[in-house]
Image (cartoon, helix red, strand yellow):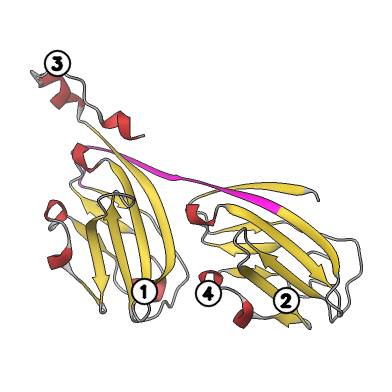
């Protein structure tokens, strides 16, 4: 089985996973895209998409070409890819009896998002966009050091921001956009960035009723120390912000 390699920047609006065939496909042909965990990423059958069959992690984020059986282009467009979408994806074509007619694999790599800013700037934005019209009961949580301390940087829950639940280091320094669930723009503005803010950040979108993580993304922020502050410092020890990258 031949394998394609695809690479995309985290933060891109979409990425295409290619799969083409020269075989003429009939209307009752079934096309399935699955990820490495065997989740159904996208299902096409009987001449139309079958969104109720796909795993909810991918709902609203996948698209195949209309009339795809005519040109034989079975490529899949995945919207708003994050580093958690890194995976091997398999496109399988079945006939009416369920026999495999074709199978193709695509390995997708998503580059980590890296943000740099100098200490002393008024603010820095950690970007994240996803599908619009998220559920009204969704919880959006930005955290620092997502794999260890999970320090709460900003929390949006119960249709409003929750400043009482964020870590004291970020009090009065964070902001998200209005109508974030409606627009899907969940970017975080961090005001007055300082070198101690350097590190990895993560964002989680959680459906409150069952705690399911709908979207996940991590990114690295590097805050570079002000040169003038460095030259005037009496401490000869070099600053260690680079160790996080």
Q: Which quadrant would residue 15 be assigned to in this image? A: bottom right
In the rendered image, is residue 202 in sight? yes
Nearer to the camera, 215 or 63: 215
Is 198 situated above or below 108? above
Q: Earlier in the sequence, mark 1 or mark 3?
A: 1
Q: Which residue is mark 2?
A: 44
Q: Earlier in the sequence, mark 1 or mark 2?
A: 2
Mark 1 and mark 4: span between their CA atoms?
13 Å
Q: Is residue 24 magenta?
A: no
The numbered mark, 3 or 2, whose residue comes first in the sequence reads: 2
- The residue carrying mark 3 is 236
- On screen, residue 121 versus residue 200, left or right, reads left
Location of the C terminus by quadrant is top left
Q: Secondary structure at mark 1?
A: loop
Q: Residue at x 38, y 48 (%)?
A: 219
Q: Position of residue 175 (x, y in %)?
A: 23, 61
Does residue 113 appear left or right of residue 107 in this picture?
Answer: left
Instruction: Name the dominant secondary structure of the magenta segment.
Output: strand
Mark 3 nearby-residue class (10 Å; few <14, some 14–19, many ≥20): few
**Given this view, does label 1 or label 4 mark the residue nearer the observer?**
1
> Tag on residue 56?
4
Could you tell me how far apart the alpha carbons at marks 3 and 2 are, in whole angstroms? 63 Å
- Rendering coords of residue 154 (x, y %): 23, 61
Bounds of the magenta segment: 106-122
Mark 1: give few (<14), some (14-19) or many (20+) Cα within 10 Å. Answer: few
Q: How many marks?
A: 4
Residue 40 is tagged as none
- Foreground disc of the pair 3, 4: 4
Residue 137 position, x and y percent, is 33, 81
Discs 1/3, front: 1
* Mark number displayed over residue 211: 1
């Amino acid at each position: 089985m031949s394998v394609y390699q695809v690479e995309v920047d985290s933060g891109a609006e979409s990425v295409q996973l290619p799969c083409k065939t020269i075989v003429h496909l009939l209307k009752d042909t079934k096309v399935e895209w699955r990820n490495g965990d065997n989740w159904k990423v996208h299902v096409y059958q009987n001449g139309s998409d079958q969104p109720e069959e796909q795993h909810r992690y991918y709902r609203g984020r996948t698209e195949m070409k209309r009339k795809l059986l005519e040109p034989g282009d079975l490529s899949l467009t995945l919207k708003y890819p994050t580093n958690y979408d890194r995976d091997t994806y398999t496109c399988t074509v079945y006939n009416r009896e369920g026999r495999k007619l074709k199978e193709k694999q695509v390995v997708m790599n998503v580059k980590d998002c890296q943000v740099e800013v100098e200490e002393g700037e008024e603010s820095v934005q950690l970007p994240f966009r996803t599908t619009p019209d998220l559920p009204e009961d969704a919880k959006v949580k930005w955290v620092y050091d997502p794999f260890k301390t999970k320090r709460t940087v900003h929390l949006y829950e119960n249709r409003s921001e929750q400043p009482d639940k964020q870590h004291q280091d970020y009090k009065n320094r964070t902001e998200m956009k209005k109508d974030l669930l409606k627009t899907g723009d969940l970017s975080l503005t961090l005001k007055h960035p300082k070198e101690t803010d350097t590190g990895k950040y993560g964002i989680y979108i959680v459906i409150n009723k069952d705690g399911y993580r709908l979207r996940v993304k991590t990114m690295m922020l590097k805050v570079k120390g002000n040169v003038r502050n460095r030259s005037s410092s009496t401490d000869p020890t070099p600053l260690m912000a680079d160790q996080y990258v």
